[in-house]
Amino acid sequence: MEVEHIEIADYLSRFEPFEDMPDQVVQHVASKVDAAYYKAGSDILLSGQEIHQVYFIRSGAVEIFRKNGKLYNRQGEGTIFGHMSLMMNNRVRFPARAIEDTLVYIIPENLFVQLCDEHEAFADYVGHGEQSGLRQAVSRARRSNDLMRTRIHKLISRDMVTIHQTATVFDAASRMTEQGVSSLLITNDEKPNSGVVGIITDQDLRTRFIAAALPYETPVSSIMSRDLITVDAGQYIFDAMLIMLRYNLHHLPVNRSGRTVGLIALSDLIRYESQNSLFVVARILRAQNVQELSVLQGEIESSFARMANENANSHMVGSAMTIFGRSFTLRLLELAQEELGPPPIPFCFMTLGSMARDELLPGGDQDNALILDDSFDAAIHDEYFRQMATFVSDGLAECGYPYCKGEVMATNEKWRCPKQVWVEYFDKWMDSPTRESLLHSSIFFDLDGVYGQVEWVEKLKEQIAAKARMSPAFLSAMARNALGRTPPLGFFKDFVLEQDGKHKNSLNIKQRGTAPLVSLVRVHALAVGSTAQNSFERLGDISYAKLLPAGQVEALRDAMEFMSMVRIRHQAEKIMQGTQVNNNINPEELSPFERRNLKQAFQVVSNAQKFLKFKHPGGKGHKGMG
């Protein structure tokens, strides 16, 4: 392969849809494309002309027009145009003109058709038409961060180092020393690529072998970690980072097609996130008291600001911030039990709202509850769990997670009750939706287990999903509640801003943007029986169920991402300025690009609310709905 083609292939692989395609396919495309240069102001495609190729922009920028001459879109580096005209009888429907000196790669029609026929990712990408400005904005942000565009398989730089499970710990330690590794995968037979059944690390040798004074001939299977958490080779590096954050791991096996093909370590991720958030989680889980935990608040804020400045996407930021919050909660529960002694009956501490959705951001308050075993006797057991809840809630407040103003916390005895009572709560809320229960719905229908019998929460999610989809009156009431807040767009699609008070000339992007979108996604997710909690994962289930019109799920996903990133960058700026974090955006402080796409995102939410109202028309007789 010629050097020029290698360079083209390397460039193409940085952008959708080529980044998801096999290397050999991208190399083949690179060998078949031609290059063309257009000076600023020159026409590339004219209306009605015959077309037998598509264009990939290497550098520069292009304006796309409608047939009537009105501007339709602007596209820049890393985007494709011309494909819709090619697929519509080979006649140009969207004329194109270079607005900067522009270099393009020309993909011939026969190769384009072959790629569509043989590669689903390519066909899906080009099937959406010329990308909207909002889609381009979201894609551009995603491409700018190595964590989100680099696949995990690119981190695997050496063959797996393994040993058979019947080998001795001495043999395992010798092999680790010989190979210069800090961990070793354990297999169930002598073949290097056989099934992996466990892992040992340097820490295991220290804590499970040396500290326990075990003999050299101890089989390695007796100290290895089983039930491995793994990641797929095709996932992104940020997926690996989130898994390692959530489970406090320093080594992560990598699978391909169900078979382990390698291992990545914490050190492999450091060059992608130099001040690694994994270290922050480790410090949280090692803290010996509430005071040690509270001083870590500054590190959490610094991690958040750094992720925002490095263009991490909203799912990554929200997930990382959630993991920090869960880690604080987990450590406080452990400290509470050290002080109070073991719990008298089994329990589950669950988180609610944004933390349950993996969408926690700075300023979010604490929403939590306790599920207790059905053997709970208030006279005997409640004082213990009241003290536990108080310890955790007070500790979270000291660590920067304010008390819930609505008292949706385990300190409230109403939200500290047995399993059966929780089932009755949800049944009542769905059978007879009232104004009060619908206010709870925005919190309690997002739930996740943090500590204890977390399987109870999973069972509760399944029961909720099964009942909700068969409760049209409840879904209509939820839909009506979700329509209570509308995007801040006026009649002429201008922003509607606060007219007085300390937030004059601003808009609250959470209350008028992301929160209404989260609410309507929740309704659709319940309607299809989804047990997912994260809004993006719920959209995936909604898409699979084909509940919404074609293209609407993608539009909602892009709108959620763009609004969330505007909110995240605003909050990061407040943190770096040392001022109080809020969600109030002044549109005049945004770039024209951001203002234009924020309006488009709000319009997506507005259209989605209209569809929600059509899909779940408000019925009469909903008790307390007024």
Image (tube, rainbow, N blue to C red):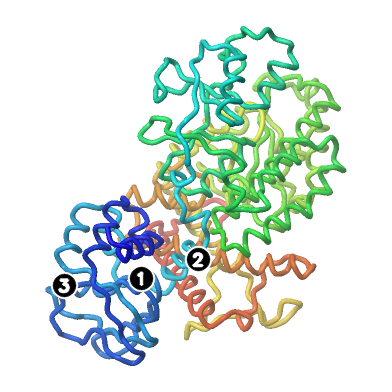
What is the C-alpha distance between the residues marked 3 and 2? 30 Å
- Picture quadrant of residue 107: bottom left
Q: Is tag 1's residue or tag 3's residue first in the polypeptide sequence?
A: 1
The image shows residue 280, relative to residue 499, as above or below, that is above
Quarter of the image where one finds residue 575:
bottom right
Answer whether residue 483 is visible to the viewer in this image.
Answer: yes
Give the SS element for disc 1: loop
Please name the amino acid that badge 1 sits on. Answer: Thr
In the rendered image, the vertical position of residue 66 relative to residue 258, given as above or below:
below
Q: Tell me the mark number nearer the camera, choosing from 1 and 3.
A: 1
Say what secondary structure mark 3 lies in.
Answer: loop
Q: Is 223 rendered above or below residue 267? A: above
Mark 3 or 2, which is nearer the eye?
Answer: 2
Q: Are marks 1 and 2 in contact (CB under 8 Å)?
A: no
Q: Residue at x 71, y 46 (%)?
A: 408
Locate residue 175 relative to residue 9 in the image: left or right.
right
Of the image marks 3 and 2, the number of the one nearer the N terminus: 3
The disc labelled 2 sits on which kind of residue? Ala
Q: Name the one closer to the observer, 330 or 440.
A: 330
> Percent x, y for residue 280?
72, 45
